[in-house]
Image (cartoon, coloured by chain):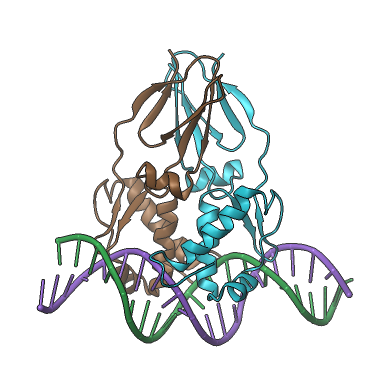
Chain colours: A brown, B cyan, C green, D purple
DNA sequence: CAACATTTGTGCGTATGTATC
DNA sequence: TGATACATACGCACAAATGTT
């Protein structure tokens, strides 16, 4: 239940509620969240607060939103194994706007950047790659 | 220059401008961005649009914001080398709410989760770790 | 220590545009 | 066509944290 007297922003409380429903399986992968209007009405919030809550979950990679369609719980895709080459290293970071477009990445999805000994780098979608070492 | 006739949201155009200034070094690490009010006035936007632009940059891990203090370009910390153990693998993902608290992670900072052959896992801050292989 | 100005956070309301079904 | 849903953008007000005076 969302309680204005609690010392936590209303949109964070709503995000907590939805996150629990996702983690518990009550909202399984692929299932739609209620519309922003519905969430606003059922919880007694204005739509901007609902949008802030959903934006939080998007940034955490838990849901994806499509305009005119709605917000759904993200489905995990199979991760392709990718071997980390010898004498090289990898870092995790968030993609730039351009990289997100190029690799068709959802919000809340990081990238793995691999730097080879020769100095060249490659960028890989963080939700489709599993970095391995034999 | 921000142009309402262009087919790109105003707050995205502002984010592009600021991102360029960060990438070019015009806004070096540690330097403060103009206040939201100032940005709104100088670019002819309302404050909500400015806040959306800064929220984008935060989600990309480019800036950090402190209430009552302002928004500054994120300073890159030294990345500690961490060897990916043999026969194990690593994935990059965004942290849960609890993990963000536990590791004191800023917005826009992913984590590296390492899974060992015995099934145990460890989680590491994505901005302080460089995954290596000898 | 208090008072103040500055800055970001939260929350509401309204309106219009655009994509999807 | 129409209904639904999300995106963008503006306005206002007050709260809370910070740094300075």
Is D6 on the left-hand or right-hand side of B46?
A: left
Count every numbered label the image shows and give the total: 0
**Residue at (55% x, 73% y) in the render:** B47
On screen, residue A36 above or below B89:
below
| Quadrant housing residue B57 | bottom right
| Quadrant housing residue B88 | top left
Q: Residue A16: x and y, percent? A: 43, 56
**Residue at (54% x, 45% y) in the render:** B100
**Residue at (52% x, 57% y) in the render:** B16
Any part of residue A1 in sight:
no
**Residue at (51% x, 68% y) in the render:** B2
Any part of residue B105 in sight:
yes
On screen, residue C4 above or below A22:
below
The quadrant the C terminus of chain B occupies is top right
| Quadrant housing residue B8 | bottom left
Q: Considering depth in this image, is A53 or B109 the residue closer to the camera? A: B109
Q: Residue B124: x and y, percent? A: 55, 33
Q: Considering depth in this image, is A127 or C10 the residue closer to the camera? A: A127
Q: Residue B53: x and y, percent? A: 52, 62
Q: Considering depth in this image, is A84 or B94 the residue closer to the camera? A: A84
Q: Residue D6: x and y, percent? A: 32, 64
The quadrant the N terminus of chain B occupies is bottom right
């Amino acid at each position: 239940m969302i309680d204005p007297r609690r010392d936590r922003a209303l949109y964070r409380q709503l995000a907590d509620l939805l996150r629990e429903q996702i983690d518990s399986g009550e909202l399984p992968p692929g299932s739609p969240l209620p519309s922003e209007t519905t969430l606003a009405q059922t919880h007694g919030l204005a739509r901007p607060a609902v949008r802030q809550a959903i934006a939080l979950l998007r940034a955490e990679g838990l849901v994806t939103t499509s305009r005119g369609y709605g917000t759904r719980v993200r489905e995990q895709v199979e991760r392709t194994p990718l071997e980390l080459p010898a004498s090289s290293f990898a870092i995790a970071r968030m993609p730039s706007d351009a990289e997100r477009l190029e690799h068709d990445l959802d919000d809340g999805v990081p990238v793995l950047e691999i730097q080879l000994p020769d100095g060249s780098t490659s960028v890989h979608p963080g939700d489709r790659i599993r970095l391995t070492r034999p």
